[in-house]
Image (spheres, helix red, strand yellow):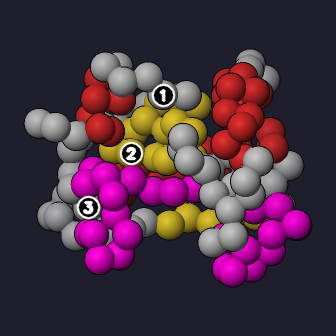
Amino acid sequence: MDCLFCAIIAGDVPARQIHADEHAVAFLDIAPWHRGHTLVVPRQHVADVLEPSTALIDIAPAIETVSRLLVDRLGAEGLNLLVNNRAVAGQEVFHLHVHVVPRFGEHPGMRGLFAPDPAAGGELDALHALLTAAS
């Protein structure tokens, strides 16, 4: 199978992983919309949420854990959860994934979600260290 996210899960492609459990792996997006933008993916290959599967239910605890981590460690004032299903909806990697996007006051609202912070990608290593440091 030629799936980028399966390769990340297998450890064949490096990623800045911030959470993992038996059902999911979460890692910082390499082209973040906002500071801390994270992808939560099921370990099981599922193309999208429309494919018959319990994958979205299975990764729900990881989504919650990652959401709380981003709010607590980054001081986010809120967050967006987004799933793109199929190419017409903007899905680029055809392995189910949930975007967890921390939100800050300087870019509020839905329009602000799609006006990415250009500085967000320049601090991935520092964010990874912050998010994976022991509490």
Which residue is at 31% across, 52% downward?
93
Q: Magenta span has 89?
A: yes
Q: Nearer the viewer, residue 44 or 39?
A: 39
Indicate left or right for 26 with 117 as reference.
left
Which image quarter: residue 80?
bottom right
Query: What secondary structure is marked by label 2?
Result: strand
Q: Do callouts 2 and 3 mark residues in contact (Cβ within 8 Å)? A: no
Real-space CA distance between mark 1 and mark 3, rounded to the nearest whole angstrom: 21 Å
Eyeballing the image, is 129 above or below 45? above
Checking the image for residue 100, the label placed there is: none
Query: What secondary structure is marked by label 3?
Result: loop
Total numbered circles: 3
- Residue type highlighted by circle 2: Val
Q: Is residue 95 visible?
A: yes
Along the polypeptide, which appears first: circle 1 or circle 2?
Answer: 1
Q: Magenta span has 64?
A: no
Checking the image for residue 48, the label placed there is: 3
Q: Nearer the viewer, residue 81 or 60?
A: 81
Along the polypeptide, which appears first: circle 1 or circle 3?
Answer: 1
* Residue 110, percent from left and from top: 67, 79
- The residue labelled by disc 1 is 15
- The residue labelled by disc 2 is 41
Query: What secondary structure is marked by label 1?
Result: loop
Quadrant that contains the N terminus: top left
What is the span of residues highlighted in magenta in the rendered image?
86-113
- Residue type highlighted by circle 1: Ala
